[in-house]
Image (tube, rainbow, N blue to C red):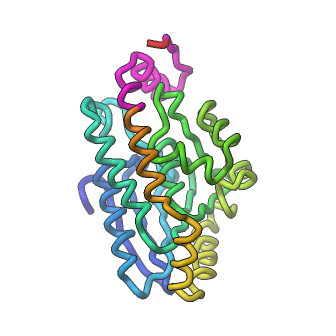
Amino acid sequence: MQGKFIVRTDIQNHVGIISFSCPPYNHVSVELLRAMADQILALDEVDDCRVVILRSEGKVFCAGADFNEGGDFAADDDDAAVLALYAQAARLYSNRKPVIAIVQGAAIGAGLGLALVADFRIASEQSRFAANFVKLGFHAGFGISTRLPEIIGQQNAARMLLTGERVNGATALDWGLVDMLATTEDLEKSAMHFALQIAENAPLAVEATRATLRGDISGRVQSAMRFEAGVQSRLKKTEDFAEGVQAVALRRPGQFSRK
């Protein structure tokens, strides 16, 4: 246990399972992502591990960054916290082995970005995905502006990014945002079954094929995050951002003024 979160790793039948918990909403933090990146990269050096499952505990996969008063990013006036977060996010994109994310509930904002790190996502009909940055008066981050169009296409990505709407599991499957739906009770079993289909293959061949498919994903994401961070820095100073954070916290529409 480190601070207020837990990250632990287990290996079963050539499958590495990274579980994280940061109650109650599994908000991301620099320290949490650093611990996750440390463990996912460590699994690259474990020959007994051939594929990784990334999962969280609780009803929410990840509610993103916490901009509310007292949250990790509430007083990030010099952007140091966001830049540090993205540095760790970039590390998550630098591992060699396939990653399967189990999204058992909501993946919101940076939580969506975390889910997009994975090669595959398994969810239930109750899962929800949202890039709600515009509702916060903010710009997408975590490399989402490049990863989301790559996965679901330009038009569906534009819909998610410009409306901020929540996409349910069935729609996410239709759009290719998730690769498999299972009941909430069967998510772990389904993810393990899928992981074993990968793990039974020659590991060097799997890693080489994955590298070909993903190309320079680390470079693309890092370039996107540098651009995103610059726009976020500008928008964070606006009155609309302050209003958006409050509006989302109170679950009401924002009263924006273009200031």
Q: Quadrant of residue 71?
A: top left
Vertical order, 248 against 28 (above or below): above
**Location of residue 247 in the rendering, given as x and y in whole percent from the top left corner:** 48, 23
Front position in the image: 126 or 135: 135
Up/down of 253 relative to 85, above or below: above
Q: Quadrant of residue 141?
A: top left
Quadrant in the rendering for residue 82: top left
Q: Identify the residue at image location x=46%, y=29%.
A: 138
Give coordinates of residue 242: x percent, y percent: 39, 21
Q: Position of residue 222 (x, y in %)?
A: 41, 51
The quarter of the image holding the N terminus is bottom left
Residue located at (49% from left, 81% from top) = 50
Q: Is residue 239 magenta?
A: yes
> Foreground residue, 171 or 222?
222
Q: Give the residues drawn in magenta, as a range.
A: 231-257
Which residue shows up at 50% across the image and 33% down it?
133
Pick the front one: 236 or 167: 236
Q: Is residue 181 above or below residue 81?
A: below
Residue at 59 percent of width and 71 percent of height: 191
Using residue 240 as the reference point, say whether residue 102 is left or right of it: right
Tell me, yes or no, whether the highlighted magenta stretch contains residue 52: no
Q: Is residue 159 left or right of residue 117?
A: right
What secondary structure is the stretch in magenta mostly built from? helix
Instruction: Give the number of callouts.
Output: 0
Quadrant assignment for the C terminus: top left
What x and y, as percent, mark residue 148?
59, 48
